[in-house]
Image (spheres, rainbow, N blue to C red):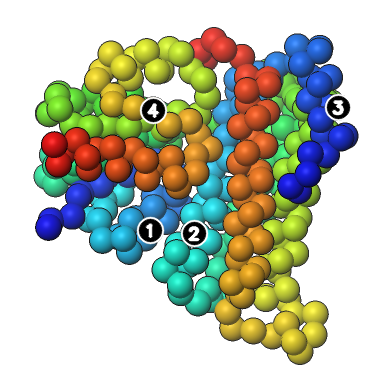
Amino acid sequence: MTQPDPRVEALFQKIAQENIQVHPLLWTAIYQHIGDPVIVINLLMHYYLENNLPIPKEEAKTILKYTKRIEETIKKIASAKDIPEDEPDPLFREIYKKNLRLDPLTYELIVDRVRNDIMVIDLKVSRYLYPFNEEDKKEFISKEDAQVVLRYTHSTLGFLDRLRQATAKKEAF
Amino acid sequence: MRQLKILIVDDEEGIVELLQRIYSARGFVVFGATDGIKAVEIFEKERPEVIFIDVHMPFSPIDGIETLERIKAIDKDAPCIMLTRIYDEESIKRAKKAGALHYVTKPFELEDLDRCIEEIKEKLKG
């Protein structure tokens, strides 16, 4: 996570070479349903760590609720045809109507970086809810695990900012 | 010394709730609103010294820019910081015209908001 991944760097290079841009509606979806949930997880960990408070294991449910939203969004923005016609969110309905989808390079990057970060966060917290063994049966999320979650949210936020700079259209929408 | 009052306006409930928890724990008096109308009501009543407003609020009856304009109509000196989702020149232009103090690009880090608060605190001291 801390070392630049050559595969990711190559994808960014390709995006720049091919001048790939992401449609503003897709960016809105990324901000709203990936960026915002990551901010919430980040702030949640900040709150407990900054105040040196024990983190009740129930907060793992909160985190998983947001990571699920991120996962679903990644699926939706990969291919408009996957968005059901009865989709309640007007933003996704519009994306569906316009048949918008992420280009394969940007999608690959998002899967590579965001989904991996989210998977680590999921694994870190889900064992508090679904313990693998006796040792995992704890009432509070450890500070070490909270630090890991926080680190991965920083990683995702940094990645999204870089991707925005690499692909966002400059005009207003 | 009296602590600053902060108003957070964002249609993502989790963000509002957690920023309220974080800044309250630091001793600030924090108000939250998930829509622009409620934000203007709180502003009118509480007169917070720092206001963060999300520009893009699809689930709010009025968007962030209109919220800013309505707050500025009540108090033209209200220090409003806009949270923008994209390099949206039109919104930034409108926000500047309406008198926004700063803008912070989303997704933000807590430190970005801390810096804005510190700057306003310094200005108020001076």
The residues tagged by marks 4 and 2 sit, at their Cα atoms, a distance apart of 22 Å
Mark 4 residue type = Tyr
Label 4 in the same subunit as label 2: no
Circle 2 chain: A
Label 4 in the same subunit as label 1: yes
Label 2: few (<14), some or many (≥20) within 10 Å?
some
Circle 4 chain: B
List the residue tagged with mark 2: A46
Q: Residue furthest bottom?
A: A134
List the residue tagged with mark 3: A10
Residue B77 horizontal/vertical position (percent): 15, 27
Mark 2 residue type = His
Secondary element under disc 4, as helix, strand or loop, is: strand
Cβ–Cβ under 8 Å for marks 3 and 4 = no
Identify the image quadrant of residue A33. Answer: top right
The residues tagged by marks 3 and 2 sit, at their Cα atoms, a distance apart of 33 Å
Cβ–Cβ under 8 Å for marks 2 and 1 = yes
Mark 1 residue type = Ile
Q: Residue furthest front?
A: B126
Mark 3 residue type = Ala
Label 4: few (<14), some or many (≥20) within 10 Å?
many
List the residue tagged with mark 4: B103
Which residue is at a point 50% across and 34% down the rendered structure image? B106
Which-is-in-front pick, marks 3 and 1? Answer: 3
Q: Is residue A17 left or right of residue B19?
A: right
Residue B84: in sight, yes or no? yes
List the residue tagged with mark 1: B22
Secondary element under disc 2, as helix, strand or loop, is: helix
The residues tagged by marks 2 and 1 sit, at their Cα atoms, a distance apart of 8 Å
